[in-house]
Amino acid sequence: MYQTAFFASFASLVLGQQIGTYTAEKHPSMPMQVCTAPGSCTTENTEVVLDANWRWTHIIDGYTNCYSGTAWNATACPDGATCASNCAIDGADYSSTYGITTPSSGALKLQFVTKNDNGQNVGSRVYLMAGEDKYRMFNLLNKEFTFDVDVSKLPCGLNGAVYFSEMLEDGGLRQHEGNKAGAKYGTGYCDSQCPQDIKFIDGEANVEGWGGEGGDSGTGKYGICCAEMDIWEANMDATAYTPHVCKVGEPTRCEGVDCGAGDGERYESLCDKDGCDFNSFRLGDQEFYGPEKTVDTTKPFTIVTQFATDDGTDTGNLKSIHRFYVQDGQVIPNSETVVEGVDPTNFIDEKFCEQQKTAFGDNNYYGKLGGMAAMGKSLEKMVLVLSIWDDHAVSMNWLDSTFPADADPSKPGVARGRCDPEAGLPATVEAAHPDAYVVYSNIKFGAINSTFAAN
Ligand SMILES: *[C@@H]1O[C@H](CO)[C@@H](O)[C@H](O)[C@H]1NC(C)=O
Ligand SMILES: *[C@@H]1O[C@H](CO)[C@@H](O)[C@H](O)[C@H]1NC(C)=O
């Protein structure tokens, strides 16, 4: 993603890193398939867990919140470590509080706005688990990852995202003494934006310097950085897939310039926030993706992403990232680029990234931090993330509209989609489309060309 994913939970609720016991934590089941050849797949009983940031956090022996509005309770949370020992994260009521449901086996529906007893919940983020206590780890090299999506109720300004982050299998439980909740409660998130809106990092509350602006829920002094492979960031009108690399090979807490959030610091961050994106519209094919387009977003379809290595083995170097769509039984190859200075291509490799950055006048920080080879190292140990979010920083314009806002849309790389730049303002989209949702289903993973009929 381009900007920090905003999580909006209800103002009165928050998290901690002990375990609360008022609501039992029961993960929704989301089985996936592991394939060796088309039709040769076995089912794995995977499940999903809600990220810790959305959960109610209260003092360990009572109902008192450890955080409310955009402020920490100074009594319970005088500093990060004390706060983590005083506060507990509780179980989640997935359906009624967060609008997270499983309409059929292997399908997950994420509702944008969910009215509940506490007010409302906006957006959500869940992780795939291999059991109650561990994230399902993926080595994507020389493999393909496939799923179905329904974006027909996901308008401009929203982002239904399916991506991989280089998180720890146990959420940091073993590494960080202050974290007693682990993967079972969705702790340990990180991504390439080095998000600073994470309330607990490395087993400590992000209390220091915490402040919120506008409708935002706040940010603290620390961020948490790791590599990220965006398989799918999309709504009905726009889509992109994007590798993002980091200087660090595991989740790393940042502060100051390392987080890359200050003026002029974006390209000094531990991670490459822009990534090397493949957005069909931005790359010159405006008829490829959208309602009634080649990939018709009024109906469900399948997305296939392949990670090819230089020697065709699981231990080779990442060379290229390929994309296919399947809709109504037809395999649809990815769109071809039509950009002056970019050799026509329909996949991501080092050359494409270099040419695209030059053609659009963008900083190739992706290449500077190691490009495809660095991404490949991270792809060996990734956690799957599924989310729905709106964008308090730049209204999702980087995905589906004109960005930067003040740039000439006829300049190469500026127009990313048909959406009105105002459509993605959180207040606008939350009021106009509270009923928006995305459905992800039929996750398949396996050898190249094993999860779909590739012809
Ligand atoms: C803060 O927490 C303390 C207990 O640690 C509690 O007595 C107090 O009421 C809380 N304040 C708020 C505003 O919730
Ligand atoms: C996958 O299928 C495509 C299309 O049939 C083919 O071009 C490609 O070589 C196949 N890749 C592998 C690794 O089998």
Image (spheres, rainbow, N blue to C red):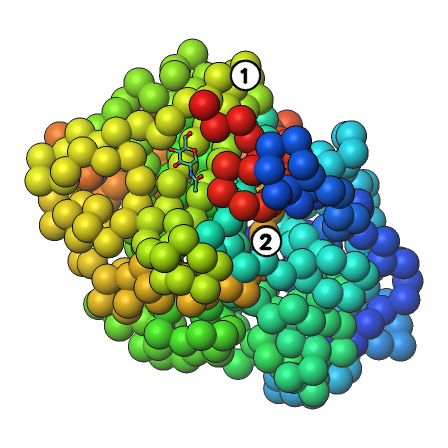
Does residue 394 lie above or below 59 as drawn?
Answer: above
Residue at (41%, 22%) from the top-left corner?
A: 332
159 left or right of 79? left
Of residues 218 and 249, the one drawn nearer to the viewer in this rendering: 249
The residue type indicated by label 2 comes to Leu
Q: Nearer the viewer, residue 305 or 314?
A: 314
Which label sits on residue 384? Answer: 2
Q: Nearer the viewer, mark 2 or mark 1?
A: 1
**Residue at the spot of label 1:** 329
Do we see residue 354 in this rendering? Answer: yes
Marks 2/1: CA–CA distance: 26 Å
User: Going 31% across and 18% down the picture, which residue do you hit?
Assistant: 287
Q: Please, what is the three-letter code of the amino acid marked with disc 1?
A: Gly
Residue 322 picture location, percent across and down:
38, 41
Q: Residue 439 got which mark?
A: none
Q: Is residue 53 above or below residue 118?
A: below
Q: Classify mark 1: residues with Cα within 10 Å, few (<14), some (14-19) or many (20+).
A: few
**Left of 395 or right of it: where is 95?**
right
Residue lying farthest left? 341
